[in-house]
Image (cartoon, grey):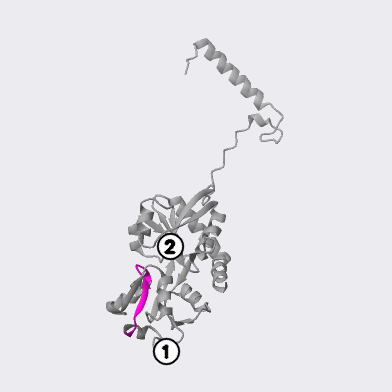
Amino acid sequence: MKRLIPGALSALILAVALGACASGSSDQPAGDATADPAAQPAAETAAPASGDLGGREIVVGTDATYEPFEFTDDAGKIVGVDPDIMTAICQIANCKPRFVATAWDGIFAALKSGEFDALMSSITILPERETESGAHFTVPYHSIGQVILVRADNSTVTGVAALPQAVVGVQTGTTGDTAATAKALVPEDKMRRFETVPLAIQALRNGDIDAVVLDSVPAEKAAKDTAEPRLMVAGEPFTQEDYGILVPDKSPELLEAFNAAIAQMQDSGQLATIVGKWLTE
């Protein structure tokens, strides 16, 4: 900055003083709406609203073999409860979801390596999954329980008490797998692990196993299928679990936006409506 020489400084002080007097004698009230717009302070640019993701694309990893939550339709598109919920979340949070199919085995490592922006794949909220993927779960968006799916013509497996005598199928690495083996509920030599739930259900239809332990909603969907042999759910759910979306620790703004949207959809009943739609189709 340049310095003012003494004479110029005196002149400047005098000019400011005269200007102040003139301002004080004005008949225009302070803050009058007719004041010169150029003299008003410039308006600050509004910051993006909290929870607004600015229209960004969100790449979502999912194991698309879990009807009705996520599966591939005849056109090759990933559809189901989770894609519909994520679409609704993004309508609120201003983002664009893009689901990418990936195998369940390795899905958490894929998120940690940066392959996806989030995981949404009927994932039960468990602390060890957060650790494995370097991520945090959102608040729950749906609650389920583990149930036993059997053939309708099976009269021996009627509930949890009968599982130790049955040959039981599960999807490897799921909470169905954990629930079936917990407290030696199913002896290891009678466990049959499959890469996907559809493979386990097909083995059940074929008579290769006596039961499948899986989440309640996909089990209910399978029980509604009219294909022969018919299937049914034996007994009541024997666990209580919550589904959440996994978001990397490096993306706290994503977690905040998703949580706010889920809360809004819970309050409005939109979450229940989406799940109900897929159960009746």
Check disc 2: other Cα within 10 Å, few if <14, some if 14-19, many if 20+.
Answer: many
Element assignment for label 1: loop
Residue 99 x %, y %: 48, 56
Q: Amino acid at mark 1?
A: Ser
Residue 190 x/y as whole percent:
30, 79
Q: Is residue 104 above or below residue 3?
A: below
The image shows a total of numbered marks equal to 2
Q: Sequence-wise, which precedes: disc 1 or disc 2?
A: 2
Q: Which residues are magenta?
A: 165-175
Residue 263 visible in the shown view: no
Q: Is residue 167 magenta?
A: yes
Say which amino acid is labelled 2. Answer: Asp
Viewer-side residue, 122 vs 29: 122
User: In this rendering, is residue 60 above or below 29?
Assistant: below
Could you say which quadrant of the image residue 201 lies in? bottom left
Q: Which residue is mark 2?
A: 63
Q: Quadrant of residue 33?
A: top right
**Image coordinates for residue 4, horizontal then vertical, percent:** 50, 14
| The disc label shown at residue 1, or none | none
Question: Is residue 231 shown to the viewer in this render?
Answer: yes
Q: Position of residue 61 (x, y in %)?
A: 44, 57
Classify mark 1: residues with Cα within 10 Å, few (<14), some (14-19) or many (20+): few
Q: Disc 2 on helix, strand or loop?
A: loop
Q: Residue furthest bottom?
A: 155
The residue tagged 1 is 155
